[in-house]
Image: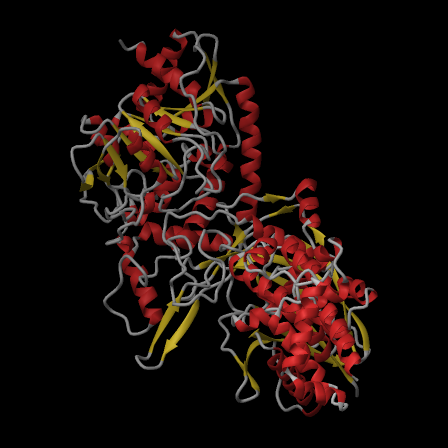
Amino acid sequence: MKYEIVIGLETHVELNTRSKIFCACGGHSSHGEPNDCVCPACCGMPGMLPVTNKRVVELAVMAGLMLNCEINRYTTFDKKSYYYPDLPCAYQVTQWFHPICTNGLVEVQTKNGTAKIGIKQIHMEEDAGKLVHDDWSDTTLVDFNRTSVPLIEIVSRPDFRSAEEVLAYLEKLKAMFRFANISECEEGAMRCDVNISIRPEGSTELGVRTEIKNMSSLSSIERAIKYETARHMDAIERQTEVLVQETRRWDDIKGKTFSMRNKETAADYRYFPDPNIMPIVIDDEWLEKIKADMPASPEEKAAEYRALGVSDKEIELLISKRNLCDLFDELLMKGCNVQDIVSWILTECAGVLRKKGQVLDELSIPAEKLARIIAMTASNEVTRGAGRKILVAVLDDDVDPDKFCEENNLAAQGDESLINDVVKKVIEENPGAVNDYLGGKTKAFQALFGGCMKQLRGNGDPAIIRAQLENELAKLS
Amino acid sequence: MKEYITKIGSGDLAVDDTLLTKGVETTAGSKILSGFVPLFSAEAVERAVKAGYTVSGKTNVGEFGLDLVGEFSNYNDGDEVLRGAAAELIAKGEVKGALEVDLNGAPRRAATLSGTDFIKPTYGTVSRYGIIPCACSGEQVGAAAANAAETKKLLAAVAGHDGKDGTSLPAEAYDYSCGKEPAGMKAGIITQLFELASEETKAVIKGYAEKLKALGVSVEEVSVEEIAAAQSAWQILMAAETCNNVSRYDGVKFGYRTPNYKNIDELYIGSRTEGMNLLTKTTVLYGSDVLSKGRYFTCYDKALKVRRVVAERFGELFKTYDLLLAPACGKTEYKKYDITRAFETVYGESVFTAVPNLIGIPAMVTKGVQLMAGHFEEKTLFKIAESAEGTDK
């Protein structure tokens, strides 16, 4: 008999906010030392009250719009009670009764075509802390840095039919959320619970479902799905075991899933509306503001850039991050040439950042300054090398390009008679290179050109130097 | 009765032990919080100090404020006649005022027993930042003093918007002195509560009604059938929220930890078993039950609906009546009783106090009588109380 896999995902995404969801502590879980990003509120001290971070609501709405969800204008927070040492209040604030987004749809491409994945809901919630086991002292330590870091949980419908679709979906979410600055989606900032069952192809009933909890790497997810599918098939075809609805844990080293002794499914979370947090009402004005703040999707941007003649490889780099696209668009509006923009962002800026040990994602430069540098080099006001020097100064100290150029005497030397003198002098001083050139070694031209540029302290107008050098050499042949 | 848990100095303000005071042990009357020294003070305490009050000390409360007037506290020393600690200090003239948390009527009962004044203001007007939380949807910091004028002064000092409390209302301050003259007002005595009270208490209410009539207020009885439902609803919400809020005390990070444990489960169970009293445990079990999967919609969710119905009913009543009168407790004196009867005893008495907690209206106890008014009508309550005091002179 042929079987089909049915998979539904619950995906937790850590939101990119400056502060936690209900207090003023810094918003990222990846802070340095344990417990250096905590306050009485996120530690669960009595007397502290939650105050909702508005940005969390905005990012959740953005995610909902990107996944074609209905945005619920009235949304509430609820308390979910359970005991665990990493949960300081013994309850988690989440959304149970009125989630912020519902009924979405996202299309994903695999080699087998397009799959439509329904989104049941997206809700906001706070993350829990982390338990760290210290083998040396055989104790378990709690780190509350991650407590109350804002998350959205995206609950899909059971619409996936293969591991490939799951991966394509997760890759798509990652690209979208990174692009829109909704989440960095770094390792650990996107975690999945995978619900999986199999059934005879054509059947409309669902089989026995198991849930694999808390997976963060795509390769583990893929392996876990394949393992779990095989286990279910064996159970059904060859009665190797009786399937039960349960929660399982993936062991990446053993390459197997294991049943978690189940306090989880037996638990009654006793959800109820959190009386400390007023219901949130998203009015038209606020919704419009959020929409206006939203970027086009990465696909739309890619199509736009492709039409401008940007190569696919370059597009991939640009659309990895929204700030790069914003910069590109602004430079384009300021009249810069497409190829110049691409090369200044992807070659020059990336190069400077690389030397500083940073990546392109971290690029932050006022568009008008980069536009000015591009304009100066394009019009030969400065040489490319001088332009690079100005760029370094702008990125390091946010200097004014024109002022920096003037103060450091970087303006291209375009005085033809001066250049002519230099060219003649260089030809005179380098008879060897001249003879080589005249003897057919065209490479020698570069040496002579470099000599001229050196005499002009790197600021000679390259086009004029080239023309004059060719002219003078022609006279000698 | 232990009045001060911690005597700080010769101040004029008592602060009850459910309100955090920076650097001073704060336990909400519970062993589970013994040794807990807060890093900051409750907003209400900060504001009172800013307004010129000096904290005299921390006063005793029943564990988490769940009992009648403080009889089941970790600091209880078994008096025969029950009194509230803060109210007694005021009655003796040891302090000018007190800040107390009203989550199930304890400070209103205490004021009644000691003959002092206490007001539980409109929900959202005084910051709850720094209350050791139990029943978040209805508890408020209230002001107690020997007379209406002092009570008014203290409440005015602490009320107003606080950004640290998400349910705090936007007004920066409230003017409680602009209440209308009583003459021509209409008051209603809630029949269902009046009938439940002892003869002595009835006499107190009748006496107060006469004073109001002398001031030109017309007084009549009014039947409010929703009273019993309001009592149940508040019991459900209060217990559920309390259950949730006290679940954080596990003996791990602060407060009491059992010395006898071999693993984390024993640490949790032992600390909570030894650290909380039977009334708290019963409340926790009850609260856990009404939130459970099978009961949520028939209990908790229904209580939320009852809250709305009661709010609508009282909204209607306040279109006719400027204020409502009722006892804040059924008797003029409580005697010591066994903790095994605490849950039902407190539930029984909460019928008198539940409505203001449930729907957030202000309620003031003065001269042994409880006055209720519509939201933000503290000014009316103060005007009435002051005018009635005037008739004594």
| Towards the viewer: A462 or A9 | A462
Find residue B364 and report its horizontal and vertical position in percent: 38, 26
Q: Is residue B232 left or right of residue A172?
A: left
Q: Quadrant of residue B250?
A: bottom left
Residue in the picture at 54% in, 33% down: B310
The answer, for residue A172, to whether it is visible in the render is no
| Towards the viewer: B160 or A348 | A348
Residue in the picture at 28% in, 32% down: B98
| Towards the viewer: B102 or A331 | A331
Residue in the picture at 41% in, 21% down: B176
Q: Is residue B125 above or below residue A313?
A: above
Q: Quadrant of residue A135?
A: bottom left
Find residue B72 and report its horizontal and vertical position in percent: 27, 46
The C terminus of chain A lies in which quarter of the figure? bottom right
Find residue A237 and report its horizontal and vertical position in percent: 71, 90
Find residue A41 and report its horizontal and vertical position in percent: 41, 52
